[in-house]
Image: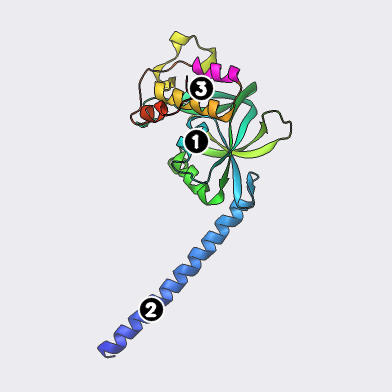
Amino acid sequence: MNRYSSLVTLRLLLLVLAVACGRVGCAENASSKVQQQQLPEVHGNKFHYFGFGSNMLGQRIHVQNPTAVRVGAALVEDYRLDFNDLGGVRWKGAVATIVPTKGAHVWGTLWEIGVENLADIDNQEGVHQSLYKPITVNVKLAGQENLLPARAYLMVDQPQSNLHELAPDAVPESRQPSKTYLKVMVVGAIESGIPNDYVDFLKRIRHNNRTAEGWEERLTQIKNFQ
């Protein structure tokens, strides 16, 4: 076989490999889309997401999920809001999770997001790092009784005790959010129209008085924070 024939053969092999890889990629994409459509929170090309921590704030969720549209304040029952330290440096303290707790409830923000951002929010929540895991919760919009399935994220390493049963001075630092993170939650709750008594509850949560660079500056630009 001469040099020219060898080059032609090599190019044909590369073309066949490219086509084969393309078909595999298409098959994987199709399988992923089928799996997405089977999720209860997915409807058409969108899905509902329940944010109860920093993702109640519009400026925060839009960093990685630009298609997110706020539906409104929403309630999930038989869960409590809690905090634990995942060792991250962004927020300078513990971050939020929800823990199954009979008789408790958590207010948050219901968002409608394009399915093209579903992988993005999984990445934001550290699913690939086993920091959080996605679940489906049934939420009620403020003033309504019908239940809507929504995607939410539970911390894999859940707190072993109920933060709200501890005296303020007994809350370990590993369970305290930063001052900035708590502010982001409060501002997001106000933005979303979450009831005032729950906003007051958030404001009473003990924080570690640390601030997260960048977000303090953003918060000063939001007029409705008090």
- Outermost residue toward the bottom? 2
Between 18 and 74, the residue placed more toward the observer is 74
| Dominant SS type (magenta) | helix
Q: Looking at the image, is 166 positioned above or below residue 174? A: above
The circle on residue 160 is: 3
How many numbered tags mark residues here?
Answer: 3
Q: Which residues are magenta?
A: 196-204
Distance between the alpha carbons at the discs numbered 2 and 3: 57 Å
The circle on residue 58 is: 1
Horizontally, is 44 left or right of 53 in the view? right
The percent coordinates of residue 39 (x first, y second) are 63, 47
- Outermost residue toward the right? 145
The circle on residue 155 is: none
Q: Quadrant of residue 51?
A: top right
- As helix, strand or loop, the secondary structure at mark 3 comes to loop
Tell me which amino acid carries mark 3: Gln
Q: Earlier in the sequence, mark 2 or mark 3?
A: 2
Q: Is residue 165 magenta?
A: no
Tell me which amino acid carries mark 1: Gly
Q: How is the image coloured?
A: rainbow
Tell me which amino acid carries mark 2: Leu
Q: Is residue 201 magenta?
A: yes
The circle on residue 13 is: 2
Q: Is residue 91 visible?
A: no
Check contact, mark 2 vs mark 3: CB within 8 A.
no
